[in-house]
Image: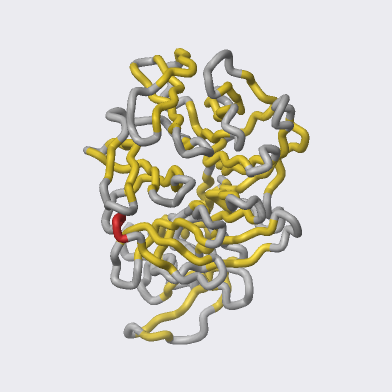
Amino acid sequence: MLGWAPDGRHLLFASDRTGTLGAWLLPVEDGRPAGEARLVKPDMWRVWAMGFTRDGSFFYGVNMGSDDVLVATLDPETGQVLAAPTAVDPNEPNFNTGPSWSPDGRLLAYLSSRAPRNYSMYDREFVLIRSVETGETRQLIPKLSGFGSGLWWVDSRSLLVPGTDSDNRSGLFLVDYQTAEAEPLPAFWNVDIRSLIAPSPDGKAVFYRKWVGGEGRLAVMDLETGEETVLFDREPEYGNALSPDGRSLAFAYRTGTTHRLVVMPARGGEPRELYRFEAAAAPVVRAMAWSPDGRYLLYALDAGEAHELWRIRAEGGQPEKLDLTIENMARLRVHPDGRRIAFETRSHGAEVWVMEDFLPATAGTSDEK
């Protein structure tokens, strides 16, 4: 549904009945079709309706931004970029988010949509599972009524996915990547999760950000006891990361204009400061991940015009800027081999367009002037 023409007798709607999404006009009389719909504008992807004016002009917005998953290769010792970032799926750009490497390193999962989310024309999402060795990709649609971006579970056979079941209950689910069957984690029924961080390596706990009084907080859920622990009493910046051994949690937070990059015990304790810097913008740290050997912490720093990739030793010291700058970096993930990284990148922008002179002569008029 895009809108009614000013005469109330013609309906403009979107359809891909010819294989490509376009705008179609249908005459309507007494609430029923009064003829065949006709194509009035092909190629209407990535748009949202704004409405008709009284003279029959139809205005709509076009999303010019993009969401994509990129993969780059680094030298784990020097940090040198060996292969520049490339789209994980060049044939379907702009619709991929939330990358996650399987613990065994064989697979890369990411959320995909054939059109941007939160727009009126299409909202078809699914998970893509890509073989690291062959590049073969297959589609996974979890057996849930709704789902979001997830992470691989510790067994490399399931994905940890936030979602809603057929009874409209919200929670976390383990989705078998072969069968798409979804098994709920009972401890997470109706827990207000903001974003997932990681499961513990032994699969006995899940780390995440949750809402507390309208702000994000770091938390961990013990899956055996169902006990939740809030780990830090301030809102962290983006990109929190659990160390490979599951013992440490890294994040950044801000006090005034001072930003602190810290590491704390994963089950609670005092944060240990790795580095601090001054910046008026908030937040500054946009993504974060550990190297598989636990020696380095990689993070994306908001430099104003773009995001820069840095790393710092886990014991602290002077940060090292790597030769990788991206317009917008989020959800940074390091492959178990320590060489490949995957991350989400987003660009923003929109245009306003207008369709004119496509209605029948009487449809584009109004008694009001």
Residue 168 x %, y %: 29, 67
| Residue depicted at x 41% and y 68% | 144
Judged from this view, the residue extending furthest toward the left is: 213
Residue 95 x %, y %: 58, 54
| Residue depicted at x 59% and y 61% | 128
Residue 279 x %, y %: 45, 16
Question: Can residue 49 be seen from the camera position used here?
Answer: no
Specify whether 6 is left or right of 335: left
The vertical placement of 205 against 249, above or below, is below
Quadrant containing the C terminus in the rendered view: bottom left
Specify whether 33 is left or right of 36: left
Answer with the quarter of the image where residue 136 lies: bottom right
| Residue depicted at x 61% and y 60% | 129
Judging depth in this view, the residue of 202 and 331 nearest the camera is: 202
Judging depth in this view, the residue of 123 and 31 nearest the camera is: 123
Quadrant containing the N terminus in the rendered view: bottom left
Answer with the quarter of the image where residue 178 lies: bottom right
Judging depth in this view, the residue of 170 and 3 nearest the camera is: 170
| Residue depicted at x 59% and y 52% | 102
Question: Can residue 267 be seen from the camera position used here?
Answer: yes
The vertical placement of 259 against 331, above or below, is above
Residue 148 x %, y %: 44, 56
State the scheme by which the image is colored.
Answer: secondary structure
How many discs appear? 0
